[in-house]
Amino acid sequence: MASTPVARLADVSQGYGSRQIIKGLDLSIEPGVTGLLGPNGAGKTTLFRTLATIAPPREGVLELFGRAVAGERDVREARRRIGYLPQDFGYYPAFSVHDFVRYCAWLREVPSAQASPATEAALSAVGLQDRAREKMKALSGGMLRRAGIAAAIVGSPSLLLLDEPTVGLDPAQRLDFRDLIRSLARAGAAVVLSTHLVEDVGAACDTVLVLREGEVVHRGAPQQLAELADPKAPGDSALERGYMTVLGKVRAAEESAC
Ligand SMILES: Nc1ncnc2c1ncn2[C@@H]1O[C@H](COP(=O)(O)OP(=O)(O)OP(=O)(O)O)[C@@H](O)[C@H]1O
């Protein structure tokens, strides 16, 4: 039986000023881990901002947790259940790591009795429990990223949106991160992550979406993408070659249509 989508976009368009980035997109996000691949400028961050209710769709409908998001009240209710790690997230440099994550719990309206245990749990999930008292400004790039992941997962959101979460993580931390998102998905969360590291998608995702110029040009299990690989396509793994093959085919179809 098909599961109910956690998020659904129906005929959604999105853009900046006069530029349209996403055009008439239909998309559903199911429980489990969804990996978002796509070249620079494909619209991945724009899609995250739409799903995170930061930028309302210009046209079309955004549905979250089975309800259309139509006004301020819907946005506020939805945000309690969404964890979002933007590519460049803001923080107060003088905050301790603990206070930063706890502040994010407060923003998400995690009940005050649960805020402290939820903060401890999120810090320990990313291996920062021993750095909880350090200032944010004293963290290395990879540790800052881990603090951002902790802030996104605090309070166990139902929908977790992670924009390039593994940038700057060392190999051991990337492996731990994969375990973490798999366990969050097993606990019922829908996780969407964007990455340029195709192997992260192969290792951690149930579904992969390839976005190009604001359109989903492929959707399926990572294995299905790997099976599309043209052996002559560039790439060091079947999945990379599958990804490059899909992009190459779309480009060729566009060129022949011109
Ligand atoms: N604030 C903005 N104002 C105007 N154009 C923008 C803005 N943010 C993004 N864009 C444009 O929208 C398009 C999609 O950008 P977006 O950041 O969503 O892509 P992306 O797939 O996340 O890229 P990357 O992989 O480089 O992070 C790009 O052409 C970008 O230049």
Image: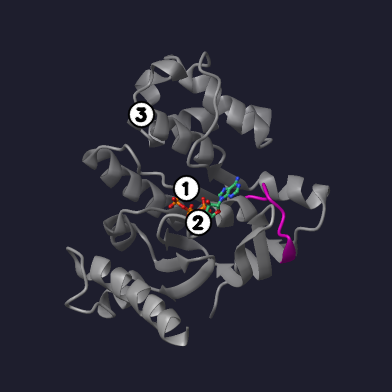
Is the CB–ligand 1 distance for label 2 below 8 Å? yes
Q: In which quadrant of the rendered view does residue 252 lie?
A: bottom left
> Magenta-highlighted stretch: main secondary structure?
loop
Which amino acid type is shown beneath numbered disc 2? Lys
Per the rendered image, the range of residues in magenta is 52-60
Q: Which numbered disc, 1 or 2, marks the residue that appears first in the sequence?
A: 2
Residue 120 placement (x, y as % from top left): 47, 28
Is the CB–ligand 1 distance for label 1 below 8 Å? yes
The relative height of residue 195 versus residue 242 in the rendered view (above or below) is above
Q: Which mark is residue 46?
A: none
Q: Residue at x 30, y 75 (%)?
A: 245
Q: Which residue is mark 3?
A: 141
Q: CA distance from mark 3 to mark 2?
A: 22 Å
Q: Nearer the viewer, residue 94 or 181?
A: 94
Q: Residue at x 20, y 68 (%)?
A: 234
Q: CA distance from mark 1 to mark 2?
A: 8 Å
- Which class describes the residues within 10 Å of circle 3: few (<14), some (14-19), or many (20+)? few
Q: Residue at x 34, y 44 (%)?
A: 177
Q: Which residue is mark 2?
A: 44
Q: Residue at x 60, y 50 (%)?
A: 49
Residue 84 placement (x, y as % from top left): 55, 44
Q: Nearer the viewer, residue 187 or 53?
A: 53
- Residues at badges 1 and 2 in contact (C-beta under 8 Å)? yes
Check residue 54 for magenta coloring. yes
Residue 232 falls left or right of residue 156: left
Check residue 241 for magenta coloring. no
Residue 179 placement (x, y as % from top left): 33, 49
- What sort of colour scheme is used for the picture? one colour
Secondary structure under the numbered disc 1 in the rendered image: strand
Does residue 29 show up? yes
Q: Which numbered disc, 3 or 2, marks the residue that appears first in the sequence?
A: 2
Q: Which residue is mark 1?
A: 163
